[in-house]
Image (spheres, rainbow, N blue to C red):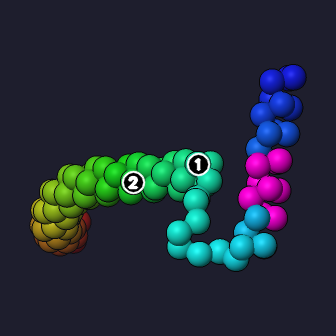
Amino acid sequence: MQFGQQVLRTLTKHIVLNTDKMKQDGWQNGKAIPATLLLGLITQGGAIVWTVSMMMSDIESNSRAISGITMRMSKVEAMVQTQAVSLARIDVNISHIRGAVEKMAN
C-alpha cells in the first residue's frame, strides 16, 4: 500500500510539474512527451489490434457456421418437399379407398 501511494504521489507531482511547465512555455512539437502517455497509447493500440483480431476470428467462425447451417437447411427443404409429395399421394389414396368403401357399402 505504501509503495502504491508513493508511486501515485510521484506521478501526480510529475503531471503537475509538466502541466505548469507547459503553461509557461506553451506546447510545441519539440516538447517531451511523458512516458506514461506513450505507454498508455501503446497499450490502447495493442488492445485495439487484439480486439480486431478476435473480431475477425469470430467472423470467420460465424461464416463457417452459416455455411454449415445453409447446407443443413437445403437438406431439410428437400425432405419437406419429399414429404409434401408423399402426403399428396396419401391423400389421393385415401380418397380412392373411401370411394371404394362407399361402393361396397351400397
Residue 35 image label? 1
Residue 66 sits above or below residue 98 on the image: above
Q: Label for residue 49?
A: 2
Between discs 1 and 2, the one toward the N terminus: 1
Work out whether 106 lies above or below 45: below
Q: Identify the image quadrant of residue 3.
A: top right
Q: Give the range drawn in magenta.
A: 12-20
Q: Can residue 38 be seen in this view?
A: yes
Q: Main secondary structure of the magenta part?
A: helix
On screen, residue 37 above or below 102:
above
User: x%, y% of residue 82?
Assistant: 12, 62
Mark 1–mark 2 Cα distance, whole angstroms, equals: 21 Å
The residue under the point 62% across, 48% down is 36
Closest to the camera, between mark 1 and mark 2, is 1
Q: Mark 2, residues whose alpha carbon is within 10 Å: few (<14), some, or many (≥20)?
A: few
- Residue 86 position, x and y percent, is 14, 62
Q: Residue at x 78, y 34 (%)?
A: 7
Residue 83 x %, y %? 18, 61
Instruction: Describe the element under mark 1 as helix, strand or loop.
Output: helix
Secondary element at image label 2: helix
Query: Residue type at mark 1?
Result: Ala
The quarter of the picture where the C terminus appears is: bottom left
Where residue 78 is drawn, which disc sits there? Answer: none
Q: How many numbered discs, if any?
A: 2
Q: Mark 2: which amino acid?
A: Val
Q: Nearer the viewer, residue 17 or 69?
A: 17
Occupied quadrant, residue 69: bottom left
Residue drawn at the location 16% of the way across and 67% of the way down:
81
Q: Which residue ends up furthest to the top in the rendered image? A: 2
